Image (cartoon, grey):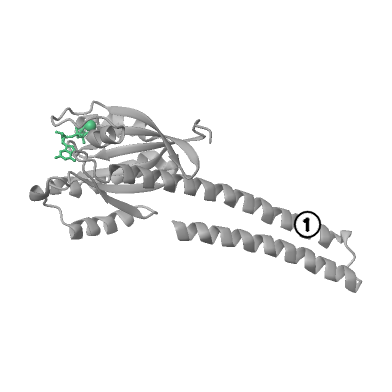
Amino acid sequence: MSLEPKRAYKIVLIGDPEVGKTSIRRRYMGKTFKGEYLKTIGADFAAQKVEIEDEVVLLTIWDLAGQTIFHGMRSSFYQGCKSALVVFDITNIESLNNVEKWTEEAVTYAKSSLQEIYLIGNKIDLKKERVVTKAQIDEKVKQLESLVNFPIRVYETSALTGENIQSLFMDLSRRLIISDNVKFEEEIGTKRLHDTKKEKRKEEIGTVDYKSKEDLKEIISHIELHIEKINDFITLLKKRLDRM
Ligand SMILES: Nc1nc2c(ncn2[C@@H]2O[C@H](COP(=O)(O)OP(=O)(O)OP(=O)(O)O)[C@@H](O)[C@H]2O)c(=O)[nH]1
Ligand SMILES: [Mg+2]
């Protein structure tokens, strides 16, 4: 397997100040956890190679400043972003209340490039201080799903212990790769259908004589062959769907 990444995906970490966006990114990059809070100025960036599904891809992870003062400059960082990780702190209900605002910001500025949104409840190591319930998270997911056209995936993490950080980024990368592959197959499928149409048109304009029984049989087997190809393609897409 070549170790050179063939594709790159841009990901943004967003959410209220102090929820742990920078800490999640640092933990994923294998850096040590920092207990003191150092607010992000504007945005931070890191790139990480990921080997998954027999492919190597490059994740570029943008960790945007949560402070209101940086709102104006944040918008330009969403361009081309495929996944948005909307982070809240499970010990701070206000940070969950604000996730809609963050989701709207991502949808507005990332536009059509955005393919998926993850809702991340961070700081799960602080069990005794937890105030956000699972029911409140489920309720929030429903609200977010009414804002966007794709399902919201939920993860609970700890940047302190590292719990669920690797699995989150692996899941996210795998979904991006699969969705890219399906798009590619759909393009091939469209081309095949287009070719079938062209063949049919040729027959209609008289390159095949319909009069004899043999000719008619040949046309039928010709069309059946195409139907077979289309059915194979449908089966392939259904398999992909089952794995999503
Ligand atoms: N206990 C615990 N503390 C955490 C966790 N993640 C982050 N923190 C702490 O929370 C504080 C804020 O973390 P940051 O990662 O800087 O927060 P941020 O979301 O990047 O903040 P801004 O850059 O201002 O938007 C720091 O003191 C971290 O040590 C976690 O999972 N558990
Ligand atoms: Mg930060």
Across and down, in percent, residue 129 comes to 8, 48
Judging depth in this view, the residue of 52 and 190 nearest the camera is 52
Across and down, in percent, residue 160 comes to 18, 38
Q: Residue furthest bottom?
A: 213
**Quadrant of the image containing the C terminus:** bottom left
Q: Residue at label 1? A: 199
Q: Residue furthest left?
A: 128
Q: Residue furthest front?
A: 1
Residue at 53% x, 51% y: name it.
182
Question: Within the image, what quadrant is residue 35 found in?
Answer: top left
Q: Residue furthest top?
A: 41
Question: Within the image, what quadrant is residue 199 found in?
Answer: bottom right
Residue at 55% x, 58% y: name it.
237
Judging depth in this view, the residue of 18 and 168 nearest the camera is 168
The relative height of residue 224 versus residue 42 in the rendered view (above or below) is below
In screen coordinates, is 242 left or right of 143? right
Q: Quadrant of ligand 1?
A: top left
Whether ligand 1 has any atom under 8 Å from the Cβ at mark 1 is answered as no
Residue at 30% x, 36% y: name it.
28
Q: Amino acid at mark 1?
A: Glu
Dot 1, crowdedness within 10 Å: few (<14), some or many (≥20)?
few
Across and down, in percent, residue 188 comes to 63, 50
Q: How many marks?
A: 1
